[in-house]
Image: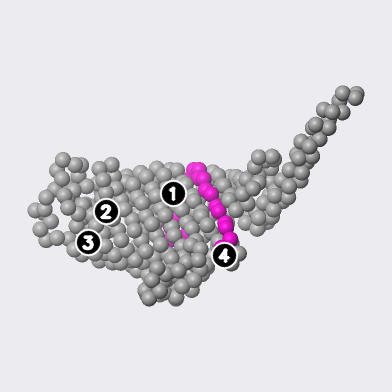
Amino acid sequence: MKRRWPLLLSLLPLLLGLAAYGHFWRGWAADFETTLAGWFPGRQVQVTGFPYRMEAELAWVKLTHAGGTSVALAVEKLRLNRGPWRPELTVLQGQGVALAAGAGGLQARAAAATATASLKIAPDAAGLNRLARLSIVLPGATGNAGLGPDYRADSLELHIREVFGAKPADPASPRLAQHGQLVIGATGFALGQGAPISLAADVTARAAGRMDDYRRWADGGGSLDLVMTGSDATGELFKLDATVVPLATGLRLGGTITTVCPMAVQAALTGRVPPAEQRLRSAVRLALETALPAGGAVALSGIPADLATRARRGQLPACPRLR
């Protein structure tokens, strides 16, 4: 019996450490449960995963928000994870996922059999919680972007963040400060009957203040800077540089498209069947203006009169159908 006491005494610090960690873990788990109760009102949430993680599972989740902007989420099965020392970061895994968002008359939706996401909330200099990053990955996504026919994609990624302490690059500039950013990436993206391509888009949201109210953003001179490129295995097909501004009943998009496939781009914008077209050796720049949501007239100008005689890359595949 006397020999056992030294062994027990040597294990005592470990046992005390485990007890203290268990106490703290339970407190962290309780905080996570409180957070989830705020995210999912009316749901009973139990956090498990001791000792390495904190995890909760929910079934048949439906969340909606309506107002100047609308957001809807439906998930058949949702798993949420958080590390004990990372309360600002939550990782989500979903099955049977459907997302929808709308603003300014524009409605977009996406659905996928599975999805993963990470949500990071962090305080700014004033101590207010901000959206530091929301990243969503949707394999095998389908849906509609509100800009034409339905789409499908092998993979669709959305990355959204709120800009902290936003200031204009030039105080004398009439452009407002950047307050938000949306980055979109898609592989195997096909719009309607179009061929699959890769898309990359960067949307910069400019506003007079924090973007938590659509009407205040629209009435305060808010705008969106959009840069989007489309490419296939051969190279870049088009690049869109545009500005989106709010109107009384929607949005207006104006900018330029630089492309080696001008007829394919024109057909995609007007909903027509594109003619056979080889890629140009030198890209042309077209001017674009249209009203959103889709359905308004598309003003596309700048197609050269001598387009038929311009040099082509005959050794490369023909321009793909984009819609």
Please rate how many residues cluster around mark 1, counting C-alpha atoms within 10 Å: few if below 14, some from 14 to 19, many from 20. Answer: some
Identify the mark at residue 286; answer none if there is no mark.
3
Whether residue 247 can be seen here? no
Classify mark 2: helix, strand or loop. strand
How many numbered marks, from 0 up? 4
- Coloring scheme used: one colour
- Label 2 and label 3: CA atoms lie apart by 10 Å
Classify mark 4: helix, strand or loop. loop
Classify mark 3: helix, strand or loop. strand
Q: Which mark sits nearer the N-terminus, 4 or 1? A: 4
* Identity, as a three-letter code, of the amino acid under mark 4: Ala
User: Residue 127 lies in what quarter of the image?
Assistant: bottom right
Q: Name the residue tied to disc 2.
A: 238
Residue 306 pos. (x, y %): 10, 58
Q: Which residues are magenta?
A: 101-125
* Identity, as a three-letter code, of the amino acid under mark 3: Leu
Q: Which mark sits nearer the N-terminus, 1 or 3? A: 1
Q: Which mark sits nearer the N-terminus, 2 or 4? A: 4
* Identity, as a three-letter code, of the amino acid under mark 1: Glu
Q: Which mark sits nearer the N-terminus, 4 or 3? A: 4
51 in magenta: no
- Label 2 and label 4: CA atoms lie apart by 40 Å
Q: Name the residue tied to disc 1.
A: 157
Q: Establish if 62 lies above or below 25.
A: below
Q: Name the residue tied to disc 4.
A: 125
